[in-house]
Amino acid sequence: MHSTTVKKKSIFANLTTQILIAMVLGGILGIIIHNSVSVETATSFSNKIKILATVFIRLVQMIISPLVFTTLVVGIAKLGNVSAVGRIGGKALAWFFTASLISLLLGMFFVNVLEPGVGLNLLNVDLTSATEVAAKTQSISFENFIEHIVPKSIFEAMATNEILQIVVFSIFFGLAAASIGDHAKPVVNALDKTSHIVLKMVNYVMNFAPIGVFGAIAGVFAVRDFQELAITYFKFFGSFLIGISSLWVILIVVGYIFLKSRMTLLLKRIVSPLIIAFGTTSSEAVFPKLTEELERFGVKDKIVSFMLPLGYSFNLDGSMMYMTFASIFIAQAYGVHLDMGTQMTMLLVLMLTSKGIAGVPRASLVVVAATCGMFDIPIEGIALILPIDHFCDMFRSATNVLGNALATSVVGKWEGDNEMLSEISE
């Protein structure tokens, strides 16, 4: 057992090291390309090298649907009754609501105190770049969100990786299986075995993570002048980093309050998912890996399989903080005054319209654009933050992963299921 543990730790450490090296090499290559070739050649290179990241993310997306369905159904069937599902779901939603509110308020606080948009020069801003994002804002509304929750077809939901819809179907399926009892055991056992096979596939897919991260980083730096971006967006990006760092401090402190010394172990477990999310700007890309690491940490599989899919729809802490920050930043840049009452209304709107959008490309920007339109803030202001958005997305994606890992672990402890797995954790 000891040799197996050492081997697992070695593999984990090697993957993390490889990803970090890939990020550095990707950045160096991107900068070299940017400084040594024409803009057209650099753009062509960026489009081609990003295929590495696209392939990796597609490999992950390939296993998300079967993983969510099988683990969630088995988890609910093991919970055994509607009251247990309701109890855990209630705790989960209470946590998600509180975390979202704190994240939104934090973004509002720092953008008002630091005022990164005040006095911004709006000349030479490419407004055409905001067209694609603005075009998607029509579908962002509370009514559309409610309609979107219920799947027309589970196969359609799985084909498009609509996590929230898969969760709804899986809850009904799991509760039905639990109510049948022993007659459903063969189906539940088959799904349990399937979930373990899918988790084994996770190990194979994660071997491509360094390659995906390398392609993503190299592609961005090939077409972006980092020095120019740093100078132009120093105040915006610096203010955002202060806000997101404060959110990390809050999350980690809360983690130590609820998990005590085990919080340190949790942070060690999720290093690899955090780095992958940071490098690929996709919290969805680490869903399978995060599932595996939380179970290794000691959270029971039935809690992980129930909490994580919900968290990916309702608990995007980093994105929530960014949404209020970016929306008010654009208002500041255009001189649109928003009193505190209006800002609180904006916060509540964001609380509702941001749910269930995980998996939507540039989801945070789409919600920000829709919110700006509701409050008579120029939607074309999205063009102000598009050049720096990728770098902001790196931080908010990693923050989303931390928030969901923490929420799952704490609810697991509340349920009395967060036990030490001594063979793995020692």
Image (cartoon, helix red, strand yellow):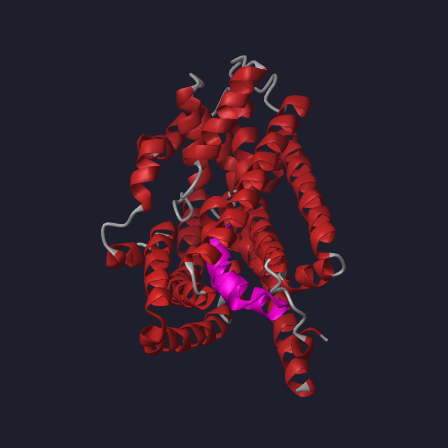
Q: Is residue 222 above or below residue 189?
A: above
Quarter of the figure with the N terminus: bottom right
* Residue displayed at 61% across by 58% down: 409
Instruction: Residue 355 in the image: state x and y as whole percent.
Output: 43, 40
Look at the magenta stretch and give its main secondary structure.
helix
- Residue 282 appearing in the image: no
* Residue displayed at 61% across by 30% down: 105
Instruction: Compare residues 115 and 292 and report the one nearer the observer.
Output: 292
Magenta range: 281-308
- Residue 327 appearing in the image: yes
Instruction: Compare residues 158 and 386 and report the one nearer the observer.
Output: 158
Instruction: Compare residues 280 and 304 and report the one nearer the observer.
Output: 304
**Residue 378 placement: quadrant:** top left
* Residue displayed at 49% across by 28% down: 348
**Number of numbered discs:** 0
Instruction: Residue 150 in the image: state x and y as whole percent.
Output: 30, 47
Q: Is residue 314 above or below residue 210?
A: above
Q: Is residue 296 on the magenta stretch?
A: yes
Q: Is residue 211 on the magenta stretch?
A: no
